[in-house]
Amino acid sequence: MSLGAYTITLMETGESYRCAGYRSVLEGMEALGRKGIPVGCRNGGCGVCKVQVIEGQYTRRVMSREHVSAAEEAAGRALSCRIKPTSDLRILVLGQMKKNVCRLVEPADDSPLRST
């Protein structure tokens, strides 16, 4: 079990988050604080949290072949609830999570140019 923390970068937005090596990539992703991230079953059976790992190393646990075929797995596709980083990762979010995970949150308007 790795105790290091790694940087996970979402390719769609360029955002990054830190993920401890003992946590799944999905658990780390939840720390982004997005509302409405569908996380599904968390056990590799529903396929909601599918990602494409573009770069980096990870360990994986059993995933449903209904959602990730052996060929997809060999090509770097995985369920984020079933992988843990062992290095920094660059990922693409696929499927149902993409809409909520990959939207950029607009910063609050803290402009000092308000009239009183």
Image (spheres, helix red, strand yellow):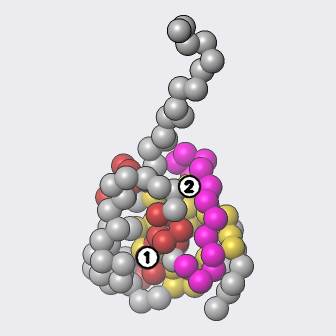
- Residue 35 disc label: none
Check the image and name the residue furthest to the top: 115
Q: Is residue 39 left or right of residue 56?
A: left
Q: What is the number of callouts on the image?
A: 2
Q: Count residues near mark 2 (Cα–Cα under 10 Å), then give few for <14, some for 14-19, many for 20+.
A: many
Q: Residue at x 33, y 55 (%)?
A: 36
Residue type indicated by callout 1: Cys
Tell me where residue 57 sits by quadrant.
Answer: bottom right
Q: Is 9 above or below relative to 66?
A: above
> Would residue 50 be seen by someone viewing this image from the given angle?
yes
Q: Is residue 16 left or right of residue 101?
A: right
Q: Is 78 above or below relative to 110?
A: below
Residue type indicated by callout 2: Leu
Q: Label 2's element?
A: strand
- According to the picture, the residue beneath numbered tag 2 turns out to be 10
Q: Residue at x 32, y 58 (%)?
A: 96
**Taken as a whole, is the magenta stretch helix, strand or loop?**
loop
Check the image and name the residue furthest to the front: 116
In the rendered structure, does residue 65 fall within the stretch colored magenta?
Answer: no
Q: Label 1's element?
A: helix
Q: Which residues are magenta?
A: 11-23
> Would residue 58 be seen by someone viewing this image from the given angle?
no
Contact between marks 1 and 2 (CB within 8 A): the answer is no
- According to the picture, the residue beneath numbered tag 1 turns out to be 81
Q: Nearer the viewer, residue 86 or 1?
A: 1
Q: Residue at x 48, y 40 (%)?
A: 105
Q: Is 20 above or below relative to 106?
A: below
Q: Is 9 above or below relative to 82?
A: above
